[in-house]
Image (spheres, rainbow, N blue to C red):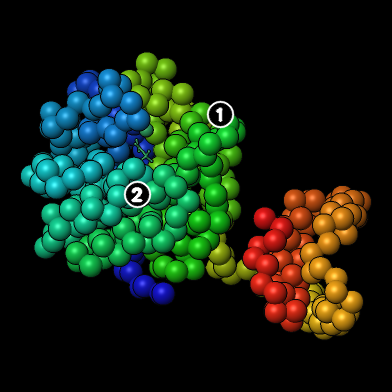
């Protein structure tokens, strides 16, 4: 399904949109000091701070609550920077609107709960405030889009999607696995939506912020949401991933921002390369078609001779052989494994159909 959204056309020209500020508002002094320092980098467009914090365990710092609204109001009034907070229910929405907060965001744990998202959408009916929607904690693009649709249906026209990665069971170098393909799929379904990357919650570690931000720029994201605190090591939440305003400036200075089709460049040489790619892709398809004809003959042979469709030893040795060849050609064995799993699964399905013996997902 394709849904068109207006998606903040005025901000689209200001790429990358930078949202920065602490994970949590802690004290009025911390909010003001951080905002003052961030203001001196004029690339910061929006100031963020959580005042109601959805924490994994009870007993952790759960935000200062409503009192933080007046501190953010000061940032807006005295420094002229639009301010953003997280909302998770109708009460938060009401309080945020009363305090003239400029932008709301829906956190990852809330996006995963359609009841909560609907409650927020209902509370926003008739108010056209920009809303950012983080991806849910699990890699479910449909759930993310569902939340976006609830907001669109409530009449919100300025919507942004925030990519903050997803939880994983195994330990890795990321706090939340980026699963970049989620964003590619989101963009396919909502081509006009504003997409912002949140390298802070993906990394969980300030050392990785620049690298993740650069990948986001290379993938044509519209903006970045980066947690920044004037004294990150003393932060009451997410200390390890926050950067000082000076570090943020350094990260932004080093960022290479690319355009999809930069103005005034000669596209001829890339057109030639693309022609080669198109030709190669056509050949891949031709070969797959040739392969599928051979598969049918193999199926016939197996049928005539009472052989099983799936031959485990042959499949394992073939895969190992393909991976070895890939390595020799400097191709990633993982890629080859994925491609051949798909090809092999398809071949098994074809043979099953021909032998009329449905053996489902036999290699899983
Ligand atoms: C946050 O932005 O501070 C936050 C809680 O993020 P998430 O919802 O992505 O975990
Ligand atoms: Mn945080």
| 10 Å crowding of disc 2: few (<14), some (14-19), many (20+) | many
Is residue 192 positioned above or below 324 on the image?
Answer: below
Asked if 359 appears above or below 199 in the picture, the reply is below
Whichever of labels 2 and 1 marks the residue nearer the N terminus, that label is 2
Q: Residue furthest top?
A: 234
Q: Are marks 2 and 1 in contact (CB under 8 Å)?
A: no
Badge 2 marks a residue whose secondary structure is loop
Tell me which residue sits at (39%, 49%) in the image: 136
Q: Quadrant of residue 37?
A: top left
- Residue 290, image x and y in percent? 83, 82
**Image quarter of the C terminus:** bottom right
Residue 259 shown left or right of residue 223 in the figure? right
Observer able to see residue 40: no
Q: Which residue is mark 2?
A: 112
The answer to whether residue 204 is left or right of residue 328 is left
Q: Residues within 10 Å of mark 1 (few under 14, many from 20)?
A: some
Where is mark 1, residue-wise? 207
Q: Report whether 182 appears left or right of 93.
A: right
The residue drawn where x is 30% and y is 46% is 110
| Rendered view: 215 above or below 287 | above
Viewer-proximal residue, 332 or 235? 332
On screen, 92 above or below 5? above
Q: Nearer the viewer, mark 2 or mark 1?
A: 2
Say which residue appears at 41% left-offset and 68% top-offset: 190
Q: Position of residue 217 (x, y in %)?
A: 54, 51
Residue 141 appears in the figure: yes
**Ligand 1 rendered quadrant:** top left
Query: Quick one: SS at disc 1?
Result: helix
Residue 6: image x %, image y %? 31, 68
Residue at the left extreme of this rendering: 98
Q: Quadrant of the N terminus?
A: bottom left
Between the C-alphas of marks 2 and 1, the distance is 28 Å
């Amino acid at each position: 399904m394709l849904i068109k959204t207006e998606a903040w056309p005025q901000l689209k020209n200001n790429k990358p949109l930078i949202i920065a500020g602490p994970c949590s508002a802690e004290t009025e002094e911390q909010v003001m000091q951080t905002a003052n320092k961030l203001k001196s980098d004029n690339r910061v467009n929006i100031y963020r701070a959580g005042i109601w914090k959805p924490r994994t365990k009870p007993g952790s710092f759960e935000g200062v609550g409503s009192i933080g609204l007046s501190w953010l109001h000061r940032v807006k009034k005295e420094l002229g920077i639009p301010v953003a907070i997280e909302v998770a229910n109708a009460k938060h929405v009401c309080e945020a609107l009363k305090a003239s907060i400029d932008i709301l965001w829906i956190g990852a744990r809330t996006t995963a709960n359609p009841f909560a998202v609907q409650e927020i959408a209902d509370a926003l009916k008739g108010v056209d405030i920009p809303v950012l929607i983080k991806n849910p904690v699990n890699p479910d693009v449909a759930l993310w889009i569902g939340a976006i649709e609830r907001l669109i249906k409530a009449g919100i026209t300025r919507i942004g999607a925030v990519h903050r990665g997803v939880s994983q069971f195994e330990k890795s170098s990321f706090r939340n696995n980026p699963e970049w393909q989620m964003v590619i799929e989101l963009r396919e379904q909502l081509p006009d939506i504003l997409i912002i990357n949140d390298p802070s919650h993906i990394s969980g570690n300030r050392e990785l912020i620049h690298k993740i931000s650069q990948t986001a720029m290379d993938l044509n994201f519209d903006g970045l949401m980066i947690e920044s605190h004037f004294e990150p090591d003393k932060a009451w939440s997410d200390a390890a991933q926050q950067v000082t305003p000076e570090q943020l400036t350094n990260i932004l200075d080093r960022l290479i921002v690319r355009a999809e089709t930069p103005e005034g460049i000669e596209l001829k040489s890339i057109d030639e390369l693309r022609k080669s790619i198109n030709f190669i892709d056509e050949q891949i398809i031709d070969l797959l078609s040739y392969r599928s004809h051979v598969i049918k003959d193999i199926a016939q042979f197996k049928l005539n001779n009472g052989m099983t469709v799936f031959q485990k030893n042959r499949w394992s040795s073939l895969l190992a052989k393909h991976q070895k060849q890939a390595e020799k050609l400097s191709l990633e064995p993982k890629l080859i494994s994925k491609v051949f799993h798909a090809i092999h699964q398809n071949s098994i399905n074809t043979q099953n159909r021909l032998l009329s013996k449905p053996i489902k997902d036999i290699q899983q």
